[in-house]
Image: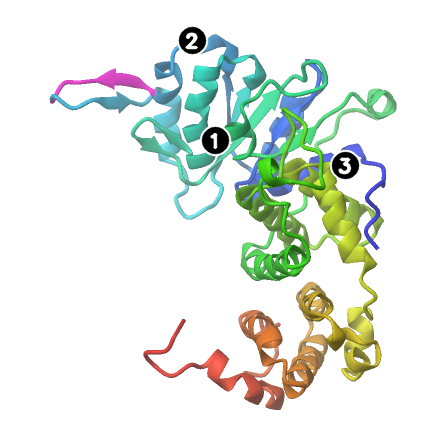
Amino acid sequence: MFNTSAAVTEAMRTHALALGIQVQHPPILVGSPGGGKSSVVAAICRKLDLPLHVLPIPDKREPAQIHGLPDTGDGVVHWLPFEWQKAFCDLDSARTPNCVVLFDDISMAPAYIQHSLLQCMHDRRFGDLVLERAAMIGAANPASGSLDIAAALLNRTWVLDWPDDTLHFADLLRTGFPDPDVPVVDRGLWAQAKQVWFELLAAYLDTVSDLLRPDSSTTLEITDGQPFPSRRSWVTAMELCAAADAAGIADEDEGKALKVLMTRGCVGAPAANSFFTWLAGLPLPKPEEILGRPGLLTERGVFDRVDRLWVAVFALVRYTLFKGDVRTWKDAWQVLSYVAEQGKLAFAANAARVLNGRRPKGAPKSVPEMAAFEQILHPPKGDRN
């Protein structure tokens, strides 16, 4: 069960930041000056062997100081990159991300500078230069309990609170300041895990209709200067949850709390709590119970409700991807075949694609249970959607 009131630890915040960097969804870190935001970014970059450039935003009074210098030599305006930007162009083009840019103190920037940051933080564009493999991070100081950051910028990033933890700081003074443990994302597994979380979100959104836009919400209070639910922010949240799965972070108490933390930073606490409360409240058998006993889906009434069936199927896929062994993979195909036999092929189609695309080492090329999905896994030429 997801506990939406679990305590957030320093290690949990560090893991959230490291995951965001690796899948190019880095957050805006919000905390008091001198609270260690920049130092933890630097430590994570050292662990991941990523070059870091810190760009102090209060020093920037013109957009050109961010995007580059304008040049009209050929009658067309171009933006000449700064030396640090050009240096990042020469980095490993086969690695994503291959560098990190930290925009420091963005909450102190005037509105027109924040507007310039939209291109940088979301599109990774500086004038004519695109650092498509970079991870862009913001750091901000809270003002009067809320962020003085434009909604458009907030919705293109996510918020990770970085409060002063006095007891943790005291421990560091005694033990030293070691580089943190950093979970490493398997990007191949992440691609599969994303689809699983998208399916879970879709099942949830089928049960509600007012959590996509803040101006249409009738059940949740949206606070100015705080994350809010939108199409973009929900996608970011699910991709971050998938990153945790792809880094092998188990669904123990801290693993679940980590996903709640990141989702709150994307869509706000009310929407995140609603999603995880719904997910935890569905009366479903555990994936390990279904494996080897697909009939349990019928016994527990899972087929009686669409949302239950969606979640049960993709919870099983999540479990299978996380386990990563041949036995679990084969047993999962038996469950999907059972779902198809009950006339619910459409509910298992995407799950079949995910499992087919992520065979564990040593797994056979096919198993008999795949026959029900032959047209889905191997569509005739000219009918590949």
Where is residue 331? Give x, y as percent.
71, 81
- Between 54 and 72, which is closer to the camera in this rendering? 72
The three-letter code of the residue at mark 1 reads Met
Please report whichever mark, 1 or 3, sits nearer to the chain's N-terminal start.
3
- Between 332 and 270, which is closer to the camera in this rendering? 270
* Residue under label 3: 11
Which quadrant would the C terminus be assigned to in this image?
Answer: bottom left
Using the image, determine if residue 20 lies above or below residue 276. Answer: above
Using the image, determine if residue 85 lies above or below residue 130. Answer: above
Where is residue 267? Give x, y as percent.
64, 39
The magenta segment is: 68-74
Where is residue 81? Give x, y as percent.
32, 23
Mark 1–mark 3 Cα distance, whole angstroms, equals 25 Å
Q: Is residue 377 left or right of residue 82?
A: right
Determine the residue positioned at 59% across, 50% down: 239
Residue 188 part of the magenta-drawn span: no
* Residue under label 1: 121
